[in-house]
Amino acid sequence: MKETRYLLPADYMADPAVHVFNDRIYIYPSHDWESNNMVNDNGDQYVMKDCHVLSTDNPMHGEVIDHGKVLDIADIPWAGRQLWDNDVARKGDKYYMYFPLKDKNDVFHTGVAIADHPEGPFIPQPDPIRGSYSIDYCVFQLDDDFYLYFGGLWGGQLQRYKDNKALEFPHLPEGDEQALPSRVVKLTKDMLQFAEKPRPVFVVDDNGEPLKANNPHRFFEANWIHKYNGKYYFSYSTGDTHMICYGISDSPFGPFTYQGVVLTPVVGWTSHHSIVEFKGKWYLFFHDSVPSGNKFYLRSLKVCELEYDADGRIITIDGGGTWSMEASSEPAFAQMFKK
């Protein structure tokens, strides 16, 4: 099995977004807390309420610094609950953090917080981005513009929207219906609002047809995009089938032709990742629930090297888990998602 490393054994963190700033790797995770909430498909068991920043100059063997709390839900004026994953972009001499947070009506929106340094602290804007919804961000720079990829099903609320408008009744496609796609939107020059209406990001089969809802490799959450050898790679979690999969396109906006599995199931329920190049090597950052004894909502950050074959396809990495109802430490939760 490929060598892996737990990055911060002393604390529970997940959903890593990773970037190289100033010749150093910066990791922007969510922060898991012990929870007494009911375990359900809305994700009430994930009670994250602050954000930390980690950094290292050697992801496999070097020191990992926890720069401490850089954003707290108590400092966000419009906050309700659940400060989930985030991502950070640098423009000029500022760093912009994009985070999902439920407002006081329990609806996810996108907040922005700004810092002078990659390790924070990040100061939140007084209001969320207008017209924002759902979760799971990846910020991608294309020339002088920045684009935000987002979207997540079930607790991520993507099924509550169609054509960027809230539905009276949520709709989750089933069977041969087209799977719900991720979204991408251009940001304004000041990085604080959407410059356009979000548009779908399609993952398609070899015939150019969008993947169906019953395809185990369809999009669910955890957006990430990177570029390798002139091609754009869109990777994502399949949610209830517990894989990280990917597609490739000549355009950062897709459609992305499905290619295969980046990461097989991990120990735990969720899978969330990022892919980054550093000093000539590629790395996969992700999480699992081994250190917590397979409590789904207490996850730990991991890293390993990622490799491509001669055709540019990602060589699948073994996540170390086999999803089974019997192995779960949360039998009610597992039964809830049984197909």
Image (cartoon, helix red, strand yellow):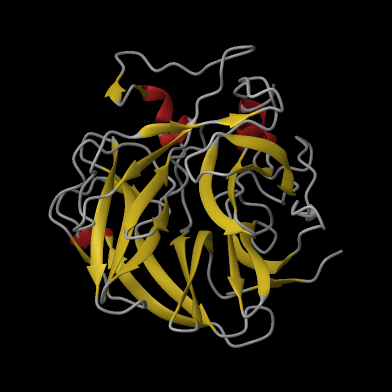
Measuring from the top left, give residue 333's x and y in whole percent: 61, 34
Compared with 112, 330 (above or below) is above
Residue 231 location (% of width, % of height):
61, 51
Q: Is residue 298 visible?
A: no
Residue 185 in view: yes
- Camera-nearest residue between 21 and 242: 21
Q: Is residue 136 left or right of residue 110?
A: right
The residue lying toward the viewer, choosing from 328 and 219, is 219
Rendered residue at 46%/48% (across/down): 46
Q: Taking 40 as reference, is 285 above or below it? A: below
- 9 above or below 316? below
Whole-percent x, y for residue 97 in the image: 32, 62
What residue is rendered at 16% in x and 58% in y? 125
Looking at the rendered structure, the number of numbered marks drawn on it comes to: 0
Q: In the rendered image, which quarter is residue 227 located in?
A: bottom right
| Residue in the image at 62% along x and 80% along y | 279
Q: Nearer the viewer, residue 202 or 165?
A: 202
Left or right: 260 in relation to 47: right
44 w.r.t. 280: above or below = above
Q: Is residue 180 left or right of residue 163?
A: right
